[in-house]
Amino acid sequence: MELSVLPLHKHPTYLLECCHLINAQWKRSETARLRSLENSCDTLPVNLILVKEGKVIGHAKLSRLPSIKDACFVESVVISESLRGQGFGSYLMQKAEEYCIKQLHLKFIYLSTTDQQKFYRKLGYVECEPVSIYGGASLKKDLQNNFCLINTSVNVCNSKINVPKPPPLPNVPVYNKRVVTYMFKSLNI
Ligand code: ACO
């Protein structure tokens, strides 16, 4: 079977297909999605696509994690719905890890998930403290000090001007009323 994991920016002909794959799982405007995908580059962020027989069947985004040295944050891991449960997700993650080691010289991968803990545990990821993708080593301080909006991409919005009074802070990060679990894996290099 012809299967390859490729950096999207080196194969821009797959942009639209990749956009549709991600949007089938997480609906967003096509323009915004394409703009985000076009940011893929040789360093970070990079969008990796899993291509099977000329079709995009999977995607994973590796993002910057400035708060932690030699690490990146994996987001938007998705496999075409009809092909799930056949090992493609595991294969994509394995190749993403290899990419982190060989191309990006990273030592750790972090991620967050609301419902795929079992999948990531199988791949060797373990639960950890929340991490911020914006500078601070932990979200805890952000949660104490700022009005935080947390989504699957772990975006923390720190608005200091004319913001409404923030709601009570959650004890744990939540997204759509579901607890967000943070996980990481040491790449052992
Ligand atoms: N719950 C429990 N176990 C699971 C699940 C699940 N939802 N998904 C996969 N597994 C198990 C499989 O049973 C399999 O175990 P096995 O080896 O004993 O059979 C193992 O995990 C590996 O499964 P794969 O077939 O490699 O996984 P798949 O190709 O289905 O990809 C993925 C997994 C990416 C989570 C896919 O199901 C998907 O696209 N889901 C919807 C989008 C999503 O939730 N993405 C993750 C968001 S979190 C993030 O991006 C960091």
Image (spheres, rainbow, N blue to C red):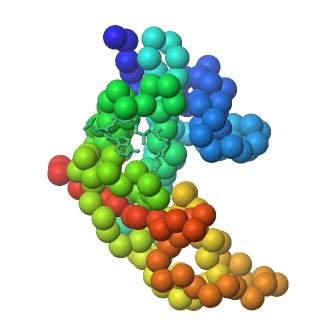
- Number of numbered markers: 0
Farthest residue, direction right: 162
Q: Position of residue 80 (x, y in %)?
A: 51, 29
- Does 69 sit left or right of 140 as displayed? left
Q: Give 103 or 126, whichever is nearer the viewer.
A: 126
Q: Relative to 80, is 101 above or below?
A: below
Ligand 1 appears in which quadrant?
top left
Q: Quadrant of residue 170?
A: bottom right
How far across and how far down the image is residue 69, in percent? 34, 64
Q: Nearer the viewer, residue 13 or 20?
A: 20
Seen in the picture, residue 80 relative to 116 is either above or below; the reply is above
Q: Residue at x 44, y 54 (%)?
A: 115
Q: Position of residue 135 (x, y in %)?
A: 49, 71
Looking at the image, which residue sits at the far left? 188
Percent coordinates x, y for residue 184 in the rendering: 31, 59
Q: Is residue 160 left or right of residue 135?
A: right
Query: Residue at the location (63% across, 44% down)?
Result: 26
At a point 61% along the width and 19% down the height, the residue shown is: 13
Please give the name of the residue rendered at 65% of the width and 77% of the height, measured from the top-left corner: 158
User: Camera-side residue: 141 or 100?
Assistant: 141
